[in-house]
Amino acid sequence: MAQLQVGETFAKRLLVYHLPLFCFIVFTIFPFYWMFVTSIKSTRETYNRDVNPYVPVACAEAVAEQVRSGRFDGSALMENCLYHWRTLLRDTLFLRWLKNTLLVAIASTLISLFAGITSAYALARLRFRGADTFGVLIFITYLVPPTLLFIPLSDVIGDLPLLHWNLLNSPWALIVAYPTFLVPFCTWLLTGYFRTIPKELEEAAMIDGATRIQAMVRIILPLALPGVLSAGMFAFTLSANEFLYALIFIYDAANKTVPVGVVSELIKGDVFYWGELMSGALLGSVPVALIYSFFVEHYVAGMTGAVKG
Amino acid sequence: MKTNPPGDSLAAARTNAGSETSFALLERPSVLGYLLMAPAAFIISFFVAYPFAWGVWMSLTNKQIGMPWSQVRFTGLMNYVDLLTKDGIFWTTFWNSFVYTGFATVIKWVLGIWLAVLLNRMVRFQRMVRAAVLLPWIVPTVLSTIAFLWIFDPDFSVINWTLRGVYTWMGWGYVKGPLWLGDPTLALASVTFVNIWRGTPFFAISFLAGLQTITPDLYEAAAIDGASGWQRFWHVTLPGIKPITVVVLVFSIIVTFSDFQIVYVLTRGGPANSTHLFATYAYQVAMVGTRLGLGAAISLFMFPVLALVIIFQLVYLRREQA
């Protein structure tokens, strides 16, 4: 896709292409570099305005010393570089939050995938009265932001309609709440995907005597597996990143998810545990970023596919 | 909502459960259709539609956290009237939301197209650079905003450290550097900056997908007709990415207008309630100040704007399909 323009001088290329691109990359990457550097500094160094903040001095010296002497000293490394990382993993509830996040994300993703697959199939393949209306409703729900509904939804989660269960402060609150934005998302993504699968395949199976449900489960679903997988990955990352509902529905430190735990438990009043905050922020975002980068092209394809209808 | 199956066919399905007729019924697209829609319909009606109605009702009452039901009174439009006539913070919030959304969206749009064009020209290290550029949009917003909280710190801001260094080096004397989050205007600008940082990758990657659907023939034809680089950009590139532009703008406006996380982490609406957006102000009034009814009213003020944007999107999509 790259278009090499003929007749461009090197200087011009540098000015209109390399330099802007370099600036963009610095712009996007710098905060992550900043997290990393802050996470491997000692608290004293973090609060010392006389040393260069861009470099973790004590840590760099310790590493240089070890390289120079050729002796590996794990405990020196631990004290000078990884102190906050160790504190985060050993003395805070970070691993609990990670477990909670995984549990909530996996459960709500599975629920949303199930509901999303069934409704997407119906919208893509079946003609029934109200199908169009339903498609539009799903699309509208997809666009409704959580911030519009969080106050009444916390009431509803605290006293479920008909059942009168109070789910607040348990993972179930989030497992129930996240499908509100994940189901429309999955439905929307998968409807487009199902439409790309030729109808003839399933019609042939039905002529051979399969029922519609058999045709759906045995023929269409396996073909749609890549679409289902990427919808699942996105649903997973969306729920792992969610903040507002997790902030409001969960009170106990031990039940929190990573984003809420890091923001609320590693800042105590006026005291900011910067090293732990930064290592927690890095550790909380790396897995999500890795998953995303593998699937982002599907996402874009899905979005443009939806534009073309 | 016309989501539930008509009673008679559902009843028929139930009475015939297990027998051959029920299988035959399932072959009928209408019956199967309603059945397959049921899980999604259930979730949407109980956890989206019902809370929405409940929120509208709450906004018409004086409900507070922990208030016994006997004291909850229907107060009509009182909350709305109070907000519009007596609440100065609400009006600040109101204007902030539009300023924040306007500035952030336009700048993300421009930067997004620019970055997409650059990425589209790229030959080497494509995957790596794309992943790097996408990071801000991918990672949990609150976690990256924490890094910005430290970057904008009043005493230890790395920006101010750098400024001080530059001033001393140039011989301009000592400079303390601005309080990035301590001054109302600067704080709103800082919050907007972080939103731009987070959203630009989304614009860029979407526009990149749009760029790749433009056939190279169009550029060749334009070049043969003697169009300059800018002319090609205006007459080929921009029209080519128009469909995706509409979708991206709609998404971005909705997400930015209803934003919560960046303001919550960076300023909590401060200094002196000057940087609130609808969502953070609603949170403060309802969850911190326990006035649920008033908070629900504040967040419902977002509804007209969101509705307009969504209707625009639906009409546009329909026109494109026709």
Image (cartoon, coloured by chain):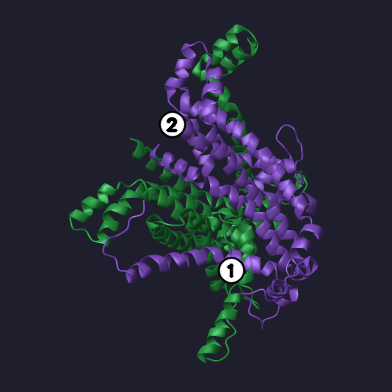
Chain colours: A purple, B green
Secondary structure at numbered mark 2: loop
The label number, if any, that marks residue A196 in the structure image: 2
Q: Quadrant of the N terminus of chain B?
A: top right
The three-letter amino acid code for the residue at tag 1 is: Ser
Chain assignment, label 2: A
Question: Observer-nearest residue: A86 or A103?
Answer: A86
Residue B213 visible: yes
| Same chain letter for marks 2 and 1 | no
The three-letter amino acid code for the residue at tag 2 is: Thr
Closer to us: mark 2 or mark 1?
Answer: 2
In the image: residue A195, left or right of residue B277: left
Q: Which residue is mark 1?
A: B274
Query: Going by the picture, which residue comes out furthest to the right?
Result: A91
Q: CA distance from mark 2 to mark 1?
A: 49 Å
- Residue A260 x/y as whole percent: 70, 55
Name the residue: 25% across, 59% down: B231
Residue B257 visible: no
| Res B290 quadrant in image | bottom right
In the image: residue A273, left or right of residue B303: right
